[in-house]
Amino acid sequence: MNCHSKSSKREQTIGKNQIPQDQEEQTITEFSSKKQRIAPKVEKAEMKIVLTEIEEKICSLLKQVLKYLEVSKKDVPPIELRIAGGWVRDKLLGRESHDIDIAVDKLSGFEMANYVNEYLAKNGHLIKSIGKIQQNPDRSKHLETATTSIFGQQIDFVNLRSETYSENSRIPEKTEFGTPLQDALRRDITINSLFYNISCGSVEDFTEKSEIERIKEKSFLGLDDLSEGIIRTPIDPFETFKDDPLRVLRVIRFASRFGFGMVDEIKEALKSDEIKREFKNKISKERVGVEVSKMLSDGNQLCAIELIHDNGCLIDSKLIHKNIKLDDKSISSLYLAAYIYPFVCHEEFQEAKLVYVPEHVIKSSLKLGNNEQRISRTILKFHTQIQNFSISNLNDSEPRTRVDLGLLIREIGELWPLSFVFSIAIDLLEPNNTFDQTIERYNRLIETVYKLELEGVYKLKHIIDGKEIAKMLNIKPGPTIRLELEKVMEWQLANKEGTKEECKNFLALEFESLK
């Protein structure tokens, strides 16, 4: 067997490895302050593979099968078996893993699984049926996999492979038997590219032999990255993401799960317009949903959401109407509103006084100021009204449309763009609302606002003020004046080019008809 002594030594301890590039050290340092806030700490330790009793039995059995093939199957070339990917990563981090994928060279996974069963049967062991999982790119299965159970542990067998992608699909155009190096370089990130050679009992890291390393004179080691807490792709991230844009979400998922920092090359690729287009064109929404669900079940949801946001993934801001601009302060307000949204319908008595729970959370629990209270209250208050407008058949040529929409924006005030964006987000939570249709519906509503020139209507002053109304109609200040002012504003919204004299005539005639 071809065992790598260098890899064997590295198995014993990799906790002291250093990143050789000053620039890279700076990248990770810059990330660390944010990581401490949003990500769980991963302790640095001496990382080595410690097999459980069952894993020892499985590895021992597989070595016996290899010996059996060497002696009894002269037509079968010498085989090496490696446990690949996530199991190796998790074991090195001291985590238990039950996801054992056996990478086979020179044979298909199904052939190898049958040889295992053949050996078990010849030696009087109970055998389990072998399931053949066909290629299914929608479930990230790009190659046929054989699955069976050994000593009660689910095992997948799959051959080492190389992949070639077409321009318009994340499904490999060509998949062939590959070398360990080719198999390692096709994977999403370096820490998922490690192997455990069953015959040698050692960890193998083939990413150090990549062409990228030779060109840039950098050490791209999965073992180093695992030790130092780095998320990096085995090859150029732009090429990795272009081949399979789903890897965009996978790098974020693993960064948030382990609290690792992403190198700058990945961040730049994530924000690339071309990668965003590839993501939109090649990845089904169902597949996105599966990956996001995994993020949200990993235990560090806030980190995942912030990484998605910070790196401009999933939601392209260009999808929301071009006139809606959100600065950092606006985004913070949206986060706060989202945090208290679950309490939006709740009121409770405290010291014999009815308290609106969202305001209580902001004021008493978070100790935020009056302005934050006002912004959150406004954003939360108008969602239903905005939603109703978005689903109605607005006719921008109808005067009533300008009146009703204008009155809503006046009531919301300068926060109307923020309230509209929040309403979009809430609507997207509804299971029956598709992303594209919801965005289109709200963009149509926002376009109507600008077409009717209502974006600044909250600043519009009454063409006739209260004193003029009192004098003209000979009425005293009070509630009646307020009602007449409302009529004035409705008239102004319906008659954009109307004059003050025309409004006075309308008001006088309308007031006279009510006597």
Image (cartoon, rainbow, N blue to C red):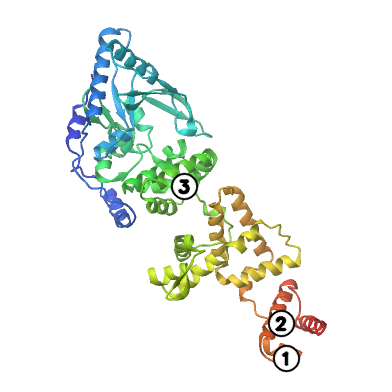
Q: Which residue is mark 3?
A: 272
Residue 203 is situated, as x and y percent measured from the top left of the image, at 24, 31
Of 310 and 296, nearer the camera is 296
Q: Is residue 341 left or right of residue 205?
A: right
SS assignment at label 2: helix
Q: Total of numbered circles in the picture?
A: 3
Q: Residues within 10 Å of mark 3 (few under 14, many from 20)?
A: some
Disc nearer the start of the sequence (2/1): 1
Q: Quadrant of residue 351?
A: bottom left
Q: Is residue 437 left or right of residue 140?
A: right
Disc nearer the start of the sequence (3/1): 3
Residue beneath the point at 58% across and 72% down? 413
- Location of the C terminus (image quadrant): bottom right
Q: Is residue 211 above or below residue 428?
A: above
Q: Residues within 10 Å of mark 1 (few under 14, many from 20)?
A: few
Residue beneath the point at 56% across and 52% down? 319
Q: Is residue 14 above or below residue 301?
A: above
Q: Which residue is mark 2?
A: 484
Q: Using the rendered image of the protein, determine whether residue 182 is visible from the camera's viewpoint.
A: yes
Q: Using the rendered image of the protein, determine whether residue 77 is visible from the camera's viewpoint.
A: no
> Where residue 475 is drawn, which disc sits there?
1
Marks 2 and 1: CB-CB under 8 Å? yes
Q: Residues within 10 Å of mark 2 (few under 14, many from 20)?
A: many
Amino acid tagged 3 = Ser
Gap between marks 2 and 1, in whole Å? 11 Å
Q: Quadrant of residue 78?
A: top left
Disc nearer the start of the sequence (3/2): 3
